[in-house]
Structure formats: structure tokens, C-alpha cells
Amino acid sequence: MANIKMVLAGSILCSAATIAGMTAAQADTWRYAFEEALEEVQGKFAQKFKEEVEANSDHEIQLFPFGTLGESDNIMEQTQAGILQFVDQSPGFTGSLIPEAQVFFVPYLLPQDNEQLFEFFRTSKAINEMFPELYAQQGLELLTMFPEGEVCMTTQEPVHSPEDLNEVKFRVMTNPLLVESYEAFGAVPTPLPWGEVYGALQTGIIQGQENPGFFLESTKMYEVTDVITCIGHNNFTTAVMANKDFFDGLGEEDQQMIQAAIDSAFEYILEYQDGLQQASLDAIKEAKPEMEINILSDDERQPFMATADQVEAAYIEMTGDSGKKILDQFKADLDAVSQ
């Protein structure tokens, strides 16, 4: 009997060791790169996602902030190749890959009211049903999109009308529709990788650029420009994606865990942004009291708003029927949240 018990105990221990080994083998390290620093909005989202994944699974998330793996095009290529499992990248950089994603750069399309804006991103059929199919065609699983904050211009001279941007060399992301938008505003759009922007402003190669307030503060754009102008034309949007082969190869439990972590990080990052824009502008003013910060009035915004139809027409010309369907659904989704 003693021998039988010993055999049974040994068998149980062996089975436990086998199960433990299987569990360890399934605990992977996943790599996640994004376009901002660790303490900026994309970094905060990534940290919350990492926290949720590691709290609810045996997997580990390794984070790669901007610059650690190259520029935006580098991290996208690495994600498509399966070197990275997750990437956070703005449609501003995926515009050439997924032209329809440029819809986010039609000026004055997104609402300026945060409550409406956040509800749009939660419920939009264009974002949650139509875009995933387009991203899948590029080997990407679209997990979510979220806004990062109102975009403002930084320039050397005050801007109160499109005439003030005449002949101003203005840095834009490598995005055809953003080029169209700033041409409509009267500027000379100049596509540049982000890593070159500070130096180009410092040396006068360009005279302006745009970004959300928190990014203007953290990257110290106020050191090489003298005026911030907010005209309400856009809210910076970004997208979190996974390599599709990687995601499709996961078990259902892991897929559901990832989506739950994404949903938690999404709500966290919207709450994190509450008051962030004003706090960032206040911090810039404190760091550089002579910095001129102008929030244009409704009347001053009208000439800029008048360019929206021109840019919208350019979007449809660039993207055809597919883009028009996205734009129509976009508008329907926006109408729904405004009700």
C-alpha cells in the first residue's frame, strides 16, 4: 500500500510539474511601441494597458517609448513584421498606408465639446466597425482609437487669420490631407519626421508646427517659438493596434483579456485628460511668461472653418467611394452624439 501511495504521489507531482511547465511556456513577453514619451498621453495609456494585462494574466508587456526603436514609420514596419506585438500610432502617419484614416484631419469635423467627443469615440460605427476591416487589410488588428487633446499651432508671429500664415513654412506629419489642410489655411506645409522638428524651428528651416497642449509643454516647443494659437480645428487622434497574425493566433481567453485591458486604459486616458490642455498652457506661460497664447474667437475662426469643404473634397478625391462611406458614417455618428 505504501508503494502504491508513493507511486500516486509521484504521479501527482509529475502532473503538477507538467501543468506548471505548460503555464510558464504560455506566459509570453509582448512588445508595445508608441510615438510619445512614457509620461505623455500615449505613454500613460500604455502603462495602464501593461498594468491591466500583467494583473490579469501571466504575460509581461515591454514598453518602447518614442525614439527607442526609431521613428513612426520604423515601429509600424516592425509591427507589421511581427517584431512588435502592439503599436500606438496616429492616423497622421498611417495615412499613406490607410488613406481613409485621414478623415481625422478634415478640419472642424470633430466636436470641441469633450463630452460629445469622448462619446463619439466610444460609440462610432466608423471607428469600431468600419476601420477594423481597413486596418486588417494591412495586417493590423485595430484595438481602439482615442483623442489626445485639442491641437494648437506654435509660430514665430501671431496668427489671427489665414493671411497671417502666408508663406509660413509649417511642419506637418507625412500625411497628404494634412498638407492639403495647411495649404487651405494659407501656409507652406512641410512634412518632417518629429525628431527633426525642434532643430528645424531653432534654425528657421520651418516657422511653425501643431500639436496638443501637453505635447507643446513636454517637448518644449515654446523654447523655439513665440506664439501659441488655438483655432479649434482638430483634436489629435491616435490608434492602438496589434499585429493581426499574433492576435489571431491567441486563444479566446487572451484576446478577451487584451480587449478588457484596452477598454480599461481607454476610459482611464479620457479621465486623465480632464483639464490637461489648460494646465499645459498655464505651465508653458509660467515657464515662459512672454509667450503669447491666443484662443481665437468664433469670428476669427470663420475664415479657417470656411476651408473645411475644400479639404473634405480633397479627402474624397484621395480615397474614393471607400473614403466617402467612412466620411458619411463619421458624420452620422457625430450627429448621433450631438443629439
Image (cartoon, rainbow, N blue to C red):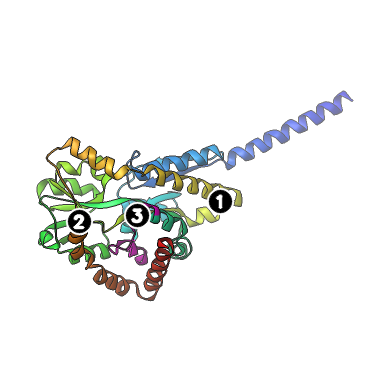
- The structure residue drawn at horizontal position 54% and vertical position 37%, both measured from the top left corner, is 55
**Callout 1: few (<14), some (14-19), or many (20+) C-alpha neighbours within 10 Å?**
some
Quarter of the image where one finds residue 172: bottom left
- The structure residue drawn at horizontal position 29% and vertical position 64%, both measured from the top left corner, is 106
Q: How many marks?
A: 3
Image coordinates for residue 125, horizontal then vertical, percent: 46, 64
Going by the image, does 39 lie left or right of 244? Answer: left
Label 2 sits on residue: 297
Quadrant occupied by the N terminus: top right
Residue nearest the viewer, comparing 90 with 115? 115
Which badge, 2 or 1, comes first in the chain's sequence? 1
Label 3 sits on residue: 113
Label 1 sits on residue: 255
Q: Amino acid at mark 3?
A: Asp
Q: Secondary structure at mark 2?
A: loop
Q: Secondary structure at mark 1?
A: helix
Q: CA distance from mark 2 to mark 3?
A: 16 Å
The reply to whether dot 2 and dot 3 touch (C-beta < 8 Å) is no
